Amino acid sequence: MTQQPDNRRQPSQDATPAHSRDAIDLSQIPAQSSDQHGTEQSWVLDDVDQQSLQSLLQHASTVPLIIHLAAPSNPVSDQIDAVLQPAIDARAGRMVMGRINTEKHPQLLQMFGVPAGPMVIALMGQQALPLYNEPVSGEQLEKLLDEINASAVQAGLAGTVPPLVEPKDAEGQVKLPPLHQEAADALQAGNYEAAIAAYDKALAENPQDQQAVSGKAQVALVQRTKDMDAQQVRTAAADNPDDVQAQIAVADLDLYGGHVQDAFDRLVSVIRRSAGDDREAARKHLLELYTVVGDQDERVAASRRKLAAALF
């Protein structure tokens, strides 16, 4: 790909654009995982501390969050985990779990208003519900989790989230699922159509695969911007402020170059002053750019609030 005037690097290179402090690394399509090492992907995060708890709590606005306030010196905690953790993973992102060692982090026990562990709590949105503090059978647990999922759907928490832990190889590198690896390999080779096709296969197998949704959107962004003449695109947008497609093109360049807030604000501004098909085109494109960045990014949350104000 020809080097563009805005110094964007080719997607096959290993680094984000040098000038972009907040750049999104589109050289690969990485899994959104924690630093926890594991041999299997999992939606259970072990040894949660104050910092990782804050990250986990963000998921409570999308899916139910189960917290095990564990007491490692009590054998009951291990018995609870033996049944609970596999049940959470079996739901493949429709709920997530964090395990807190309350003997190591007693302040977190106090935060939940529980006198002592072990205790299992469900959080949905702003609501916290104590579940149980002693071992339950697999059948009892499945029934309980089904009820929680049903309540979550009624409350509008019917999403899924990517694994919190990804399998890693001997070098500690994240191992991608086969179709995701196929997409990443195709992207590195510059074969964008093949990368998108691989993600489409993954989505055919699992329509709730949010990593595939995000990966496909990222590849599409690279594909759209790879041959753009940045100076020409920006000049056209400046000369035609009401041309929605011209503004969308600049937003793509901004996002690819790491100017995330600029990209979002440009499209929100277009939506605010547009109507009809133009407004809808800008809105749909902005939602796709949110997918590229990821819903857990605070810049996406802030822009969604601006979008809501612009629409209503």
Image: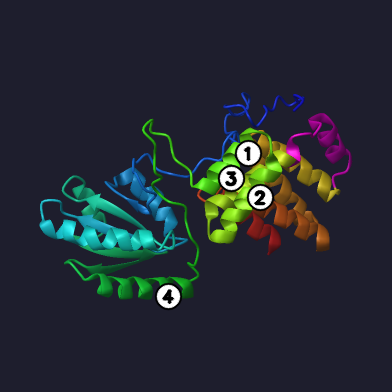
Q: Position of residue 11 (x, y in %)?
A: 65, 32
* Contact, mark 2 vs mark 1 (Cβ under 8 Å): yes
Mark 3 and mark 4: span between their CA atoms?
29 Å
- Mark 2 and mark 1: span between their CA atoms? 10 Å
Which element is circle 1 on? Answer: helix
Residue 119 placement (x, y as % from top left): 21, 62
Q: Amino acid at mark 4?
A: Ala
Structural crowding at the residue carrying mark 2, measured as other residues with C-alpha within 10 Å and reported as few (<14), some (14–19) or many (≥20):
some
First in residue order: circle 1 vs circle 4: 4
Disc 3 secondary structure class:
helix
User: Along the horizontal axis of the image, is 33 left or right of 49?
Assistant: right
Instruction: Name which residue type carries label 3.
Output: Val
Residue farthest to the right?
239
Question: In the drawing, what numbered circle is on residue 293?
Answer: 3
Q: Earlier in the sequence, mark 1 or mark 3?
A: 1
150 relative to 299, above or below: below
Q: For the residues marked 1 and 3, what is the alpha-carbon distance in whole angstroms?
A: 21 Å
Image quadrant for the N terminus?
Answer: top right
